[in-house]
Image: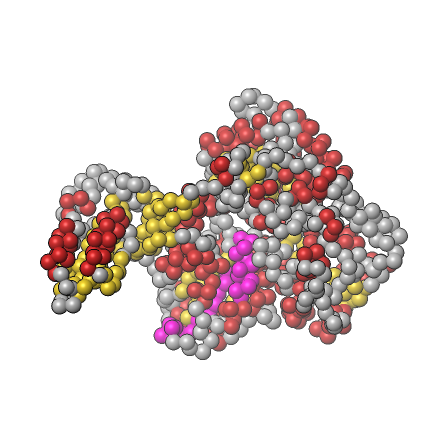
Amino acid sequence: MSSDETEASQSGAGLQGPAPEERPQPEGRRNRHGERIDTATDAEQDTRNAVVSALVEHEPGVLAKVSGLFSRRQFNIESLTVGPTTVDGHARITLVVEETDSGIEQIKKQVEKLVPVIAVGELGDDAVQAELVLLKVRGEEPDKVHAITQMYEGQTLDAGPRTITVQITGDQQKIDDAVDAFRQFGIIEIARTGQTALARGDTPTTPGESPAASAESTANTQTADDSKSTTANDNDD
Amino acid sequence: MSEPAPPRFDGEEADTGEPTADGSDPITESEATEIQTGAQSVVAALERAGAETLFGVQGGAIMPVYDALYDSELHHVTMAHEQAAAHAADAYGIVSGTPGVCLATSGPGATNLTTGIADADMDSDPMVALTGQVPTDFVGNDAFQETDTTGLTAPITKTNYFAQHADEVGDTVGEAFALASEGRPGPTLVDLPKDVTNGETDAEPGEAETPETYNPQTVADEEAVRDAARTLEAAEKPVLLAGGGVIKGEASEEVREFARTYGIPVATSMPAVGAFPEDDELAMEMVGMHGTGYANMATTHCDVLLAVGCRFDDRLTGGVETFAPDAEVVHVDIDPAEISKNVHADVPLVGDAATVLEQVSDEMGRASDADPEEVAEGYDEWRDQCREWKAEYPMDYATPDDEPLKPQFVVEALDEATDDDAIVTTGVGQHQMWAVQYWTFKEPRTWVSSHGLGTMGYGLPAAIGAKMADPDKEVVSFEGDGSFLMTIQELAVAVRENLDITVAVLNNEYIGMVRQWQDAFFDGRRAASEYSWCPEFDKLAEAFGAEGFAVSDYDEVASAVESAMAYDGPSVIDFRIDPAENVYPMVPSGGANGQFALSEDQL
């Protein structure tokens, strides 16, 4: 700036001004999330588990885009499930994540920012959640295995002289408990699907979501009256 | 390229000079030559979207597209290297505001583009990349020149596409073009398998449109606008921090108006340089690692920070713990994901920069019936303080007779010799910082640099893209000797296209910024930053067919600059500058902005 005299002999003074330690310094601080803090007590946030549902265009690469986002931005993900919805060409991705409140906000916004993602919602504690687990245990005590399976409303899928494989469905707590209960028999292998979830009652799972116009894929024959769109979930399963 | 020659057919009531066809108008250019292949549909889509210039390199899998370009009015600039094609397209997008287009073949062509795509992504520049791909049947077989381009570029594009069918490929390219500039801009990519571009189709691409599900919020919530106005009215020490979104959102006028109406000092991030004239009384100029002392003092001590279109990069904030620690942050951004990402927003305003600033402006003073002058008076003391800081920490350098040529002097000399709206491009390193510190920027879209990614070698290809986008403006490219060597081959392109650009090499025979950090933080152990031999850039320029100059004394500067500017074509001035010169002020990585060092011993 202001360099009217550009002759070599006109030498400026160089950078001037009080040194760092001579300058006034503000009192305040922020924590590492960029939030202003008054005391050291609220400096850190706790993490929590959250279920995030994303309605996406069912096109090649969309799953890779979502999962790539999680590793790229270092978000902690517990599980991810994906499957079709009532609308042709749409899919639902259900994510269970463990993050701070601000981390969960970032996850929702970053997922929503992906162009093939249509809508994103976080499900509350009252959401309908389920997971499926396959458990392969040692077959020495078939009666006892059967009893525990009954207790958890599960099914026996395969029973042989050496192994028994059962299936249990339910929310995460129930599955965790069931796995614990089967430990006594010696668990050989486990396969868990991860949580999938829907919002309870009339609330759409992702904001603005609505069923396909011609929802013929559902077994229920719906009356033409659309105004009260009852969900088929409750009585069917 | 200023005003493209009007198309031959001269439609009945054709709107002049507008190569894009309106959706309603059935007569289009592309109808003159009927579409027969996917590749022709790709080219028709680009024409329809309003593209005029493309930057690229030929190669096997993209050949069908080039064959279709053979019959097109589109101007294609053949670059020497694909990375440069991406940088040129990026710069074209920055200067013109419409997406720059680059093309490359599959495999190495696509991987060479990635640096430029990542650069555009970090800086949210509108750009479309079209890459050739092996035929669909070969995909996944590790075919010759196959690479998973959509997989590679997913993290560095706004979105990307693998073209599926010749009938749809034109629409896909149109969508990619529209998405690149709508909302928060960014690079998009369409991967084009050879069977799709060679495939038969007569499908005319439709209007370039974003998908129905893409609806960025442009108008901020009223309640947040009221909060913002009340927060600013209650402020005593406000700063307006303009980010790159101000320029991309065409909100420079609104920022100027807002700041001047209420008398609010303005600091800018590096991509926002030019959004606010640096000779304005309210200008605090660039904030952050190598920002001005006064900008860093003002942002550190402000009580309200109105941040518009910025993403609070770590080079801007320094340590986030000490960034504007007493300030309530009012954050305007069109991308909700930027709100509270790095710095918590007390008042989040999601929307278009210009629209939201007008909303806030309309709301200012409404609650208390205060007129703008009254609001502005409330900040009087603060403006005095800012003025004091400007006097206390002037941007200045010494030019002792017994030391070699200072780079700051060169920057100022070129600034003086050029128009106010001349475009400056740079590579990355010390020369980039001297350019931004000592050039006085006054207009948006005149500062073209690699901000977020920090790509050495950006300057020359960017100058080519900038000149193609705005041929009537003077274009000066500052490069370092290290940076220039990374893309110097593009001089061949500048000569071939006879582009009137001036490259100023600030040559200190070092990877200077690394050398500066080694001296400060690595006990002066200059590993791999010193050259034992550096080419003579003036002679190298001559060999490429450009005009070359070498300058090492103050009294040669003016005449070399004059000759270079007068030369009608690309010229290179090799300024042999003081190798010991460093970039200050400086906030060390993660440090407190208010504690910027004025010299190495203060670090």
Residue A142 falls in which quadrant of the image? bottom left
Q: Nearer the viewer, residue A188 or B275?
A: A188
Residue B11 visible to an observer of this rendering: no
Q: Nearer the viewer, residue B16 or A36?
A: A36
Report the side of B392 relative to B351 (left or right).
right
Q: Is residue B444 magenta?
A: no
Report the side of B135 relative to B418 (left or right).
left
Residue B387 visible to an observer of this rendering: yes
**Residue A168 rendering spot, x and y as whole percentages:** 19, 54
Q: Is residue B137 magenta?
A: yes
**Residue B318 rendering spot, x and y as whole percentages:** 61, 47
At x 51%, y 72%, the residue is: B108
The coloring applied to the image is secondary structure
Instruction: Work out which residue is located at the far bottom of the displayed protein and give it.
Output: B144
At x 38%, y 60%, the residue is: A64
Report the side of B25 relative to B300 (left or right).
left
Q: Nearer the viewer, residue B264 or B584?
A: B584
Instruction: Work out which residue is located at the far left of the displayed protein and give it.
Output: A143
**Residue B401 rendering spot, x and y as whole percentages:** 88, 56
At x 81%, y 64%, the residue is: B551
Location of residue B216 with respect to A146 vertically, above or below: above
Location of residue B365 with respect to B284 vertically, above or below: above
Q: Nearer the viewer, residue B232 or B367?
A: B232
Q: Which residues make up the magenta segment?
A: B113-140
User: What number of labels is visible?
Assistant: 0
**Residue A74 rendering spot, x and y as whole percentages:** 45, 54
Location of residue A178 with respect to B262 vertically, above or below: below
At x 48%, y 65%, the residue is: B130
